[in-house]
Amino acid sequence: TRRATMKLATYERIRAVFASTPCDAYPDLDAIRAECPECTLDALVSIYSQESSRKIRATHGKHVRAIEAHAKRYVLGEDVFSIAANVDFPACQLMRLLLEYLLGVGHKSVGGVLRDPFGRIPEVPERGTPAAEYGAKLCARLRADVERVVAWDHQASPAVDVLRHNAGKEYEDLLEELLTNEGIPFVTEQDLRADGHARTPDIKLEVPIAVKGRIVNWIDSKASFSDPVVHVEKGTEQFQGYVNRFGPGMVIYWHGIIDELNTDPNVLLVDAFPDTKDIVKLKMI
């Protein structure tokens, strides 16, 4: 299997391409792979997803402040995808803000509206909402447009969120299966939390192992590429907490790692479960 280890300079070049890609466009992954043949498709898709999320977070406040102008364009008949492309914001995210503004949907409730527009969007707008003067016709249009954006938004739809969650669970299950196959005893995050532990790794080994000469007491599974910003700003603190409680450990970024991040003597970063030949098992006493 080809491993996804990348130099920081290569990552930054790829990230710059994704950062400049409009929200309504798909990046040319084949062209990027032609320039970076060492990059796996999984790594590129993960980096693109991370950069898209970063861009959404960075621009969300601007669109919250501009929602009245966006809503005016929408109620006057402009298509939601046209507005989204024009302001470079994912259509699903724009629809969330439109529903909150036009119908008065609460921020915590808008996700349910996206999942069930025909059950959650009323036949006519409630009195006192900005949508009230446009009547049932606007509600019908909103229901249809919610279905459209959910189906076609490749960055921010509920379906994308579900896929990310499922991928995380699948890799955790894979890790447990590989450990079982190697005969390495372990307890899971659920087991640790049941014992009263908070902020735990996915796996705590009952007996430490050595991987390429490094002691591993715990393993954390990440169904992503090792985004350097997230790793340094959030991951370092998270993993240090595990080190303080359980000793040295290992993090598997299944979609690839950046060479220059692998500097912590207590946290080994890898992009796959180690080969049998690289694992030394310590016997239980």
Image (cartoon, rainbow, N blue to C red):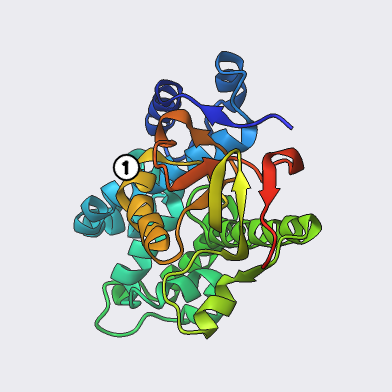
Which residue, as the protein is rendered here, is positioned at the far front? 285
Q: Is residue 48 left or right of residue 210?
A: left
Q: Which residue is mark 1?
A: 87
Q: Report the residue at 46% width, 66% height from top.
A: 142
Q: Position of residue 78 (x, y in %)?
A: 39, 50
Which residue, as the protein is rendered here, is positioned at the far left? 65
Whether residue 171 appears in this view of the structure is yes
Whether residue 153 appears in this view of the structure is no
Q: Position of residue 282 (x, y in %)?
A: 66, 56
Q: How many marks?
A: 1
Q: Report the residue at 47% width, 39% height from top.
A: 24
Q: Report the residue at 57% width, 66% height from top.
A: 204
Q: Position of residue 5 (x, y in %)?
A: 55, 30
In this rendering, is residue 251 above or below 85? below
Q: Position of residue 284 (x, y in %)?
A: 68, 65
Q: Is residue 121 left or right of residue 2?
A: left
Which residue, as the protein is rendered here, is positioned at the far right? 181
Of residue 104 and residue 27, the one placed in the foreground of this image is: 27
- Estimate how packed mark 1 is, as few (under 14), some (14 to 19) or many (20 or more) residues with alpha carbons within 10 Å: some
Q: Is residue 196 left or right of residue 173?
A: left
Q: What's under tag 1, amino acid-wise?
A: Val
